[in-house]
Image (spheres, rainbow, N blue to C red):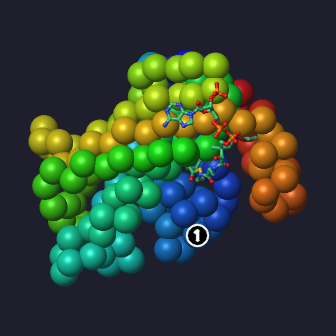
Amino acid sequence: MRGDKPLPAHAPWCMGCGEDNPNGLHLEVHLHGDHVYADLQFDERHSGAPGLAHGGAISAACDDIMGFTLWIAETPAVTRTLTVEYRRPVPLHTPVHITASLVDETDRALFIEANGTVGDTTYFAAEAVFVKVDLSHFLRHGDWGATADLITRFFQAD
Ligand SMILES: CCCCCCCCCCCCCC(=O)SCCNC(=O)CCNC(=O)[C@H](O)C(C)(C)COP(=O)(O)OP(=O)(O)OC[C@H]1O[C@@H](n2cnc3c(N)ncnc32)[C@H](O)[C@@H]1OP(=O)(O)O
């Protein structure tokens, strides 16, 4: 499963990567070796201060791309904690490169880092703990039909 390849969205309406969500970030995430990456530009839908990306939108981008390291860990998991360090304001309509990688793992927890750069400069960095869950987590708490679609995508892309 390793290599440089596009990964499927978590769900069509996923706020981070869903192609059907008009207000989403539309992240197109690729697996490359031991990390995942995406290139995006924040726009007016993601604005905080005038001309700048909202911190919540940046956090969402980090959370979502970290959710793609599950392809590396090869397990479903959900965010338990997420810490974002905002180092520089991110202007709208500016190419941002985001990467995420799995840095450590226990029986239940995944320790994940993400980094957002503009050019060679880091504008934001994030750390998260994801907790591994089984598929019943999504069936128990989420929408049955959408979860079935998620499961189909998960196995089709393997
Ligand atoms: C087909 C599907 C494919 C996959 C699709 C994936 C889609 C993903 C989409 C992603 C989209 C983007 C992302 C999103 O938007 S994900 C959406 C946002 N996140 C959530 O909704 C999660 C909500 N929370 C929960 O459901 C529960 O709290 C969970 C399930 C997380 C844990 O509740 P549970 O009651 O089960 O567990 P526990 O409290 O006993 O703890 C569990 C274990 O974890 C360890 N622990 C906890 N915290 C830490 C810590 N800080 N450092 C180190 N370890 C820590 C802890 O010690 C324990 O280990 P152990 O003592 O048992 O050994």
At 42% across and 28% down in the image, what residue appears?
A: 101
For residue 34, side relative to residue 5 (left or right) = left
Residue situated in front as seen by the camera: 47 or 19:
47
Q: Secondary structure at mark 1?
A: loop
- Confirm whether residue 149 shows in the render: no
**55 is higher (above) or lower (below) than 10:** below
Residue positioned 78% across, 59% down in the render: 142
Q: Quadrant of residue 57?
A: bottom left
Q: On the picture, is 133 further left or further right than 54? A: right
Q: How many marks?
A: 1
Q: Label 1: few (<14), some or many (≥20) within 10 Å?
A: some
**Ligand 1, what quadrant?**
top right
Residue at the spot 36% in from the left edge and 72% down from the top edge: 46
Q: Amino acid at mark 1?
A: Asn
The residue carrying mark 1 is: 21
Residue 73, picture quadrant: top right
Residue 56, quarter of picture: bottom left
Q: Position of residue 117 (x, y in %)?
A: 21, 44
Question: In the displayed structure, does residue 40 sit left or right of residue 139?
Answer: left
Name the quadrant of the C terminus.
Answer: top right
Percent across and percent down for residue 76 are: 68, 35
Q: Is residue 50 above or below residue 42?
A: below
Res. 148 in view: yes
Decide: is 2 above or below 150.
Answer: above
Q: Quadrant of the N terminus?
A: top right
